[in-house]
């Protein structure tokens, strides 16, 4: 065994050695490897710990904080332990079905090489969902870009367009529909965009496959499937755990993976065939996605999670070309998986991939290949050219490290704006064409939203996307993603609360019950106490909202079943992006035919506002438009949020509402405008008493519902019984948009402002 | 009675296409490109959407020359129905089965031209039905039917002057507005061409996706959607052949 003699080096020499070998381990961390192994490490071992102890792989800063989140509830089949979480969906023809859900980020790669970065983000999350034994059914894309009219507009527009092209260029060929997503532009993302992705899958509870070796697996084969390993994405995990240094960008390009949606398409189909065989003969298996840390990470976790060791022969891994053993073991080449199967099943598995689906014929050197065995000794051993290059206790390889980071509230004060004395009519139209409010069709029409044939509401049709996931069943699955960046700038705690509340509201608006959440927490450098404080505050807010709003119609919190943390999102000048706790909410409907959209349906029906308008313009689009940030972010009363939400869901279930829309970006005025534009009808409304700008544009949480006059009594009774604040806004009408306090105008005017502004902002 | 839904490397609509066929009481098997023994026993063939062979060179062109396509050509010549959807449409154009006048390629499917939305474009469109005298349209009762499109290359083109005008009833589907007026702006296709068949009417190449416009929920409506009748027509045609 050839070891690196690092214990003899001084701290300074060791630091230089680590730098020279592109290892981002600290000197202390390197020394602790020597202690753990009771000897000097090999170069391969150094690279392994370098990846496993990175923030990206070990969650070393975030893990203690994430414990605050509720993860358990009666409907959780699998919490945040493996590649994806699973929540109970329904029972259909005697079988229990679950929805698999995962949430990831690919922020840094997307900033550096936007097309490939965004595409491989989609590719990675699809593997996370597939490897639970699931059928992938949808994705969603929460995106945050810089100011496309600001200093950095050319680069920002390039990044935004290429990210959209990357998502389309990957998801469309694989054949997975985009169901939801959200999009914000803000200066703080000029140098560091956020590209998050959510993926859903469908699986029978009894068919779930786990990311660990099965029982009694000693002697089982370890099989790598997919693309030939190359050096692409080597160091990706540690790359994601550093800030983006402008100068280092060139050298970072190699850390971004190369997407191959064509091969992925084939791998999904061949793997579905393997699932069939596994289920037919009840074969005990383990299956895992290869993501961060490549073969090393996947195989070590498959072994350690089941208490076994692993022995691999690196020379047996199919590679694109000759590489150092640590590169082969750790590179993040896309489109690969690891199986652990009994040797009696190996030949069948190899035949499905290599002959039936002919991987080697359709993509150069792609194949399924045995590379090692599960061992009884709990060690992680890698052989290369007949020499041991890694021999470490497997638990040490996978257990990671934890840091207690300092959190300190920054000293900053926010002032509420005095901005009132302006032309509100003009402001209203500008808000409708604001990139954070206007129609998103310019983006989602590039995505295949109808492939698989199960889409009920594609993006843009309603407040949440809706799928009919199970052929032959009426059950519907709803999805929404949310987080307002400018709330995060003022108060990350309330940003967390609002993200949870809005994601849930959006799901409720179509009539679905929120049942589970995932989060992707995008923050700055956790080593800087003020940014770590922002992170902690946001998690507190999320956790509080998830418990206090809770899962509707139950006494339980709404559970987080999967999630991701992305730190080091900063500008080249070292300031963090707007704290962005992005929340995805999954909803379920017993009958998707009952779902409703926000577009107004009928002339002469009643419009009711639910939820008081408060002086909460802080972080609003109204202020954004006028270059202000403000102070008073919306502060939802969580008990009321729950009451309103349960009312909306029940009223829709009883068929009492014609349409429903959540009040968020742009406040009540923009909410009504969107309902009018989407429905092609006008409104004639008067507002409650109060100050006009707040009434129109404050983003205090709430709903507007459209009710047929015949059902008005029943709806009002329900609202009164529940003690929910509401106000009769007025009626729907033919073509004109009439709000007392604003100039009357045809809905067509509003549509013109709203419809095509995103294209102008992006091209 | 059974039809084969052909899966090439990169095809991605085979499952929902087979599902829609079965729900229209037309039993369907998914057949891999490299497993073509017994293929001639099927009563009809569907080439579904996707990115066959990664759309290398040009969409559909490699699949159009795949050995399995020879079998389908022979069976089409016997009068069996062959339906190409999206990428399958591109294949039928690339191997000359459509328009099928001479034994050569006369049409192409080129990148969309749409000022508002360059590149891949996915949305619901309206399509006008021009002929009921094909294996796929005999049961269509509506004149104008909704279907989604999802493609980057869907613009029918030809080097031959006046070819589209000479298609006549072979121009089965055209993009249109609510009152049935031809819409050439969807993807820039000549005469708004959305679907073209061979002179016999048993081979149809169409860009819109009927399998995504079969069930009411796909458009928020009750029951089955009009495009389901494309599959029902195919079944009736096969039944009629005995």
Image: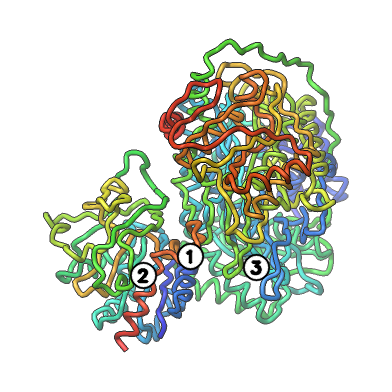
Asked whether disc 3 touches disc 1, contact meaning CB atoms under 8 Å apart, the reply is no
In percent of width and height, residue B25 lies at 45, 79
Q: Are marks 2 and 3 on the same chain?
A: no
Which residue is at 61% across, 75% downward? A276
Q: Residue at x 55, y 20 (%)?
A: A741
Viewer-closest of A370 and A723:
A723
Dot 1: element: loop
From mark 2 to mark 3, how far is it between C-alphas? Answer: 44 Å
Rendering quarter of residue A418? top right
**Mark 1 highlights which residue?**
B215
Q: Residue at x 59, y 22 (%)?
A: A622
Q: Give the mark, 2 or 1, whose residue is nearer the N terminus.
A: 1
- Residue B230's label in the rendered image is 2
Q: Chain of mark 2?
A: B
**Disc 2 with disc 1 on a shared chain:** yes
Identify the residue under disc 3.
A223
Circles 2 and 1 in contact, beta carbons < 8 Å: no
Chain at tag 1: B
SS class, disc 3: strand
Real-space CA distance between mark 2 and mark 1, rounded to the nearest whole angstrom: 13 Å
Measured as percent of width and height from the top left, residue A277 is found at 62, 78
**For numbered disc 2, what is the local secondary structure?**
helix
Q: Is residue A173 above or below residue A547?
A: below
Residue A141 at least partly seen: no
Q: Compare residues A735 and A16 and report the one nearer the observer.
A: A735
Looking at the rendered structure, whether the residues under marks 3 and 1 are on a common chain is answered as no
């Amino acid at each position: 065994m050839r070891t690196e003699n690092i214990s003899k080096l001084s701290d300074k020499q060791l630091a230089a050695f680590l730098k020279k070998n592109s290892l981002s381990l600290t000197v202390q961390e390197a020394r602790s490897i020597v202690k753990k192994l009771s000897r000097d490490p090999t170069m391969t071992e150094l690279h392994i710990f370098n990846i496993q102890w990175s923030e990206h792989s070990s969650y070393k800063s975030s893990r203690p904080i994430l414990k605050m989140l509720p993860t358990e509830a009666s409907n959780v089949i699998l919490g945040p332990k493996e590649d994806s979480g699973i929540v109970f969906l329904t029972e259909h023809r005697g079988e229990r079905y679950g929805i698999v859900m995962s949430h990831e980020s690919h922020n840094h790669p997307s900033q550096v090489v936007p097309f490939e970065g965004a595409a491989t983000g989609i590719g990675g999350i699809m593997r996370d969902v597939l490897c639970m034994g699931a059928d992938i059914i949808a994705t969603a894309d929460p995106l945050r870009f810089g100011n496309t009219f600001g200093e950095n507009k050319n680069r920002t527009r390039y990044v935004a367009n290429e990210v959209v092209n990357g998502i389309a260029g990957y998801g469309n060929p694989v054949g997975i529909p985009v169901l939801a997503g959200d999009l914000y532009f803000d200066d703080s993302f000029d140098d560091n965009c956020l590209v998050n992705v959510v993926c859903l899958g469908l699986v029978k509870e009894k068919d779930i496959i786990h990311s660990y070796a099965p029982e009694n697996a000693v002697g089982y084969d370890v099989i790598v499937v997919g693309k030939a390993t190359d050096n692409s994405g080597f160091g990706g995990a540690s790359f994601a755990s550093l800030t983006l240094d402008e100068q280092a960008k060139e050298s970072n390009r190699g850390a971004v993976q190369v997407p191959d949606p064509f091969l992925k398409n084939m791998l999904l189909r061949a793997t579905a065939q393997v699932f069939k065989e596994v289920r037919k003969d009840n074969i005990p298996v383990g299956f895992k996605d290869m993501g961060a840390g490549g073969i090393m990470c996947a195989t070590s976790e498959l072994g350690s999670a089941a208490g076994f060791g692993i022995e691999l022969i690196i020379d047996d891994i199919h590679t694109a070309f000759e590489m150092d053993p640590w590169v082969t073991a750790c590179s993040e080449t896309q489109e690969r998986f690891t199986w652990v199967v009994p040797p009696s099943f190996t030949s069948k598995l190899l035949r499905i991939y290599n002959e039936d689906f002919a991987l080697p014929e359709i993509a150069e050197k792609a194949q399924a290949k045995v590379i090692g065995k599960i061992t009884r000794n709990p060690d992680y051993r890698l052989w290369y050219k007949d020499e041991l290059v890694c021999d470490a206790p497997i638990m040490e390889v996978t257990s990671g490290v934890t840091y207690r980071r300092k959190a300190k509230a920054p000293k900053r004060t926010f002032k509420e704006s005095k901005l009132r004395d302006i032309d509100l009519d003009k402001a209203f139209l500008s808000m409708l064409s604001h990139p954070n409010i206007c129609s998103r069709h310019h983006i989602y029409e590039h995505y295949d939203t109808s492939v698989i044939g199960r889409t009920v509401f594609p993006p843009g049709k309603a407040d949440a996307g809706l799928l009919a996931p199970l052929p032959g069943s009426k059950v519907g699955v709803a999805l929404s993603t949310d987080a307002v960046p400018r709330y995060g700038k003022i108060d990350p705690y309330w940003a967390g609360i609002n993200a949870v509340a809005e994601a849930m509201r959006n799901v409720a608006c179509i009539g679905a019950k929120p049942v589970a959440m995932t989060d992707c927490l995008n923050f700055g450098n956790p080593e800087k106490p003020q940014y770590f404080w922002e992170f902690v505050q946001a998690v507190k807010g999320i956790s509080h909202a998830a418990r206090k709003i809770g899962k509707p119609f139950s006494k339980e919190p709404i559970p987080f079943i999967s999630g991701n943390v992305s730190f080091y999102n900063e500008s080249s000048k070292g300031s963090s992006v707007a704290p962005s706790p992005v929340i995805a909410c999954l909803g379920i409907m017993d009958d998707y035919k009952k779902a409703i959209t926000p577009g107004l349906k009928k002339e002469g029906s009643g419009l009711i506002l639910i939820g008081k308008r408060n002086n909460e313009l802080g972080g609003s689009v109204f202020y954004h438009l006028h270059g202000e940030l403000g102070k008073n972010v919306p502060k939802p009363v969580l008990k009321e949020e729950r009451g309103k939400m349960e009312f909306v869901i029940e009223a829709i279930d009883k068929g009492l509402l014609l349409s429903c829309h959540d009040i968020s970006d742009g406040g009540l005025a923009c909410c009504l405008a969107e309902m009018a534009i989407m429905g092609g009808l006008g409104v004639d409304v008067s507002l409650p008493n109060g100050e006009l700008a707040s009434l129109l544009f404050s983003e205090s949480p709430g709903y507007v519902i459209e009710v047929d006059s015949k059902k008005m009594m029943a709806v009002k009774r329900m609202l009164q019984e529940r003690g929910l604040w509401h106000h009769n806004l007025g009626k729907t009408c033919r073509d004109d948009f009439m709000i007392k306090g604003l100039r009357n105008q045809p809905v067509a005017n509003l549509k013109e402002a709203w419809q095509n502004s995103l294209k102008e902002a992006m091209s | 009675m059974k039809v084969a839904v052909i899966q090439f490397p990169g095809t991605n609509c085979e499952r929902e296409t087979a599902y829609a066929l079965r729900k229209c009481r037309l039993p369907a098997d998914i057949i891999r490109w490299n497993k073509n023994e017994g293929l001639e026993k099927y009563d009809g063939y569907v080439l579904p959407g996707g990115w066959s062979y990664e759309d290398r060179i040009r969409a559909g062109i490699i699949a159009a020359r795949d050995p399995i396509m020879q079998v389908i050509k022979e069976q089409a010549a016997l009068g069996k129905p062959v339906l190409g959807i999206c990428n399958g449409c591109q294949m039928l154009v690339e191997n000359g089965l459509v328009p099928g006048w001479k034994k050569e390629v006369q049409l192409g499917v080129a990148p969309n031209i749409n000022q508002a939305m360059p590149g891949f474009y996915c949305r619901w469109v309206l399509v006008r039905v021009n002929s009921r005298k094909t294996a796929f349209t005999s049961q269509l009762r509506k004149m104008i039917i909704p279907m989604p499109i999802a493609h980057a290359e869907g613009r029918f083109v030809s080097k031959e002057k006046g070819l589209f005008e000479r298609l006549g009833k072979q121009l089965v589907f055209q993009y249109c507005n609510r009152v049935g007026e031809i819409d050439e702006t969807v993807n820039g296709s000549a005469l708004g061409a959305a679907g073209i068949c061979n002179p016999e009417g048993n081979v149809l190449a169409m860009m819109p996706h009927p399998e995504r416009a079969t069930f009411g929920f796909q458009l928020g409506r009750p029951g089955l959607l009009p495009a389901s009748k494309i599959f029902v027509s195919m079944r009736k045609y096969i039944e009629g052949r005995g």
